[in-house]
Amino acid sequence: MKNYRTFTAVEESYFRDHPEEIDDYIKLIFEAYAEDGNTGALLSSLRVLSRVKGVTKIAEESGLSRKGVQKALSETGNPALSSINAIMHAMGYRLSPQKLNT
């Protein structure tokens, strides 16, 4: 029986090998979230990036525990905005509003 890598493992590997792609990816996942409101997809993508950047490092820089970061970004996570903001800052990004074209 062959052992296949999961999509998450492939995605993590890609971003480890291509860190220059992370900026565009973060912009893309938040744009997708703004359109469809799929919190699970957003948290899943942020979870992948947190592993690439190092969950322990993010925990230390965000002031959250390692378990707190993992829980916030879990499939069943329902993180407070302050947690997402702290995690984003620890990854080197910030949340900022953008005017809608209506």
Image (tube, rainbow, N blue to C red):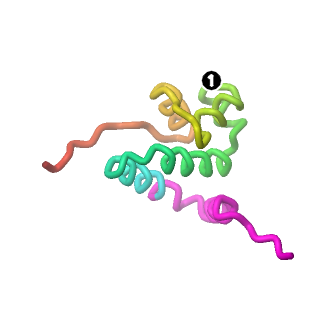
Q: Residue at x 26, y 42 (%)?
A: 98
- Horizontally, residue 97 falls left or right of residue 81, namely left
In the rendered image, the residue lying farthest to the left is: 102
- Residue in the foreground of this view, choosing between 87 and 92: 87
Task: Please state the extent of the stretch shown in magenta in the rendering.
Answer: 1-24
- Horizontally, residue 28 falls left or right of residue 47, namely left
- Residue in the foreground of this view, choosing between 75 and 86: 75
Q: Would you place residue 86 above or below residue 27 in this image?
A: above
Q: Would you place residue 90 above or below residue 44 in this image?
A: above
Q: Mark 1 points at which residue?
A: 63
Q: Is residue 11 magenta?
A: yes
Q: Which residue is drawn at 30% across and 38% down?
A: 97
Q: Where is residue 71 in the image (x, y as percent from the top left)?
A: 64, 33
Identify the main secondary structure in magenta.
helix
In the rendered image, the residue lying farthest to the bottom is: 1
- Circle 1: is it few (<14), some (14-19), or many (20+) Cα within 10 Å? some
Q: Which residue is drawn at 47% across and 41% down?
A: 93
Q: Where is residue 6 in the image (x, y as percent from the top left)?
A: 69, 64
- Horizontally, residue 99 falls left or right of residue 2, namely left
| Identity, as a three-letter code, of the amino acid under mark 1 | Gly
Q: Would you place residue 92 above or below residue 86 in this image?
A: below
Q: Position of residue 53 (x, y in %)?
A: 65, 47
Q: In which quarter of the image is the N terminus?
A: bottom right
Q: Where is residue 48 in the image (x, y as percent from the top left)?
A: 62, 51
Q: Which residue is drawn at 50% across and 33% down?
A: 84
Label 1's element?
Answer: loop
Q: Is residue 84 magenta?
A: no
- Residue in the foreground of this view, choosing between 50 and 33: 33
